[in-house]
Amino acid sequence: MDPLEKALRDARARTLLLVADLDGVQLLGPRLDIVNPPLWEMGHVAWFQEFWTLRAAGGRAPLVANSDALYDSARVAHDTRWDLPLLDRKSALEYLATVLERSIAALRLDDGAYFHQLALFHEDMHDEAFAYTRQTLGYSDPFARPEPPCMGKLPGDVAVPGGRYRLGAERGTSFVFDNEKWAHEALIAPFRMARAPITNSEFAAFVEAGGYRDQRLWSPEGWRWRAGCGAQKPVYWERTDGGWAHRRYDSLRPLPPDHPVIHVSWYEAEAFCAFAGRRLPTEAEWELAASTPAKRRFPWGEEEPTETFANLDGRAGGTVPVAAHAEGDSAYGCRQMIGNVWEWTATGFEPYPGFEVDPYKEYSQPWFGTHKVLRGGCWATRARLLRNTYRNFYTPDRRDIFAGFRTCAR
């Protein structure tokens, strides 16, 4: 089987896994700013693949009447998606199946793979969104979850010499998104970066010291966010007689102290840094620490991300201890720069010099100036999506996503 066809079928299998048990009520869910109705998202995944691989590339008529008015995310306002005459579950599944087979048939006849890759990676991103939507809404855990053993922290910093670095993707590389284009020179001062992301136990010290009540630790924007939502702890944490627990999907479990803190906003990460006398890395520092010397595709080198190197693809069913995956260390000794949790950076999401929008113009351009950059991927991210230059981006208030952070010395 062609590798791209195999990947497309794999992505679809993941999509179906993540919606297989959802009933009528769950397929819509409550009206929230941070998630889509899963039923709408199913149709959107099919629509996107059809639009780019069959309609835009092949000039074919739409399979579903009025589908653009239902599933085009650039045209359909988020808060209206619960009110649309969406395909029902059975019809949405049929739409997904039909589009996949017709798209694969078109791929076999066409040497141009760009739009098929675009549809693949788009589905991978929505599969991660399905995973965190299920967490947000307290649905059942769709992943098998063997509990990893405790391994302790991975304390300390590594010294990164800095220097002139070409930030971003080099021309001639495989598929990359427009916001990664193109590599350009950045001058980076020497810095010290934590070997591992901040752990639950480290973040608990901030919570227990009153960090959420101390306005001095928060930026004005962060304090407004904290006061507005009444945050006193990470969103899924709960106090129990035995200490801290966290809600994972539909069950409450003891908080593993040596796992990275997850589901924290950029504002929470910023306040923790003020508490600890640290700072968030810039995205240029992050990429340099992950990529050099001799700019690598992954922190460990050029070899594809397997379970030896990183916690990806949902294999572990959640986070693992920060000391795991020593084989995936960067040349400087930073661990888990790919996988486990997305890492907030200090950098606002902006275009690189000479930015030119790709055909899917809504991917990056509308979000410049309002989002923060995250790097590295998380436990639910598909490995094929990632590389050291990959830029994720969310608004700084988001804590439903699978995000944590590491710090640098001031």
Image (cartoon, rainbow, N blue to C red):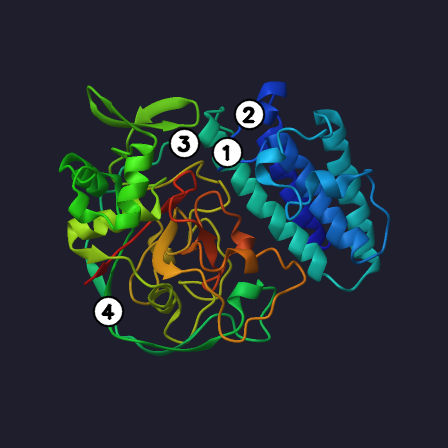
Neighbour tally class for label 3: few under 14, some 14-19, many 20 plus, Cα within 10 Å: few
Quick check: 402 above or below 26? below
Judged from the image, the secondary structure of the residue bearing numbered disc 3 is loop
Q: Earlier in the sequence, mark 4 or mark 2?
A: 2
Residue 394 at x, y percent in the picture: 45, 50
Q: Residue furthest left?
A: 209
Secondary structure found at label 2: loop
Residue drawn at the location 56% of the way across and 47% of the way down: 125
**Where 67 sits versus 110, above or below?**
above
Q: Earlier in the sequence, mark 2 or mark 3?
A: 2
Q: Residues within 10 Å of mark 4 (few under 14, many from 20)?
A: some
Q: Kindly indicate whether the residue at mark 3 contacts the one at mark 1 (C-beta within 8 angstroms).
A: no
Mark 1: amino acid: Thr
For marks 1 and 2, the one nearer the N-term is: 2
Using the numbered discs, state the Cα–Cα distance from disc 1 to disc 2 in whole angstroms.
10 Å
Location of mark 1 (residue): 133
Inspect the image, locate mark 3, and give the three-letter code of the amino acid beneath it.
Answer: Pro
Q: Residue at x 36, y 27 (%)?
A: 247
Classify the position of the C terminus by image quarter: bottom left
Q: Is residue 319 left or right of residue 80?
A: left
Question: In this figure, which residue is indicated by the disc labeled 2?
Answer: 29
Local SS, label 1: helix
Count of numbered badges drawn on the protein: 4
Q: Position of residue 393 (x, y in %)?
A: 46, 53
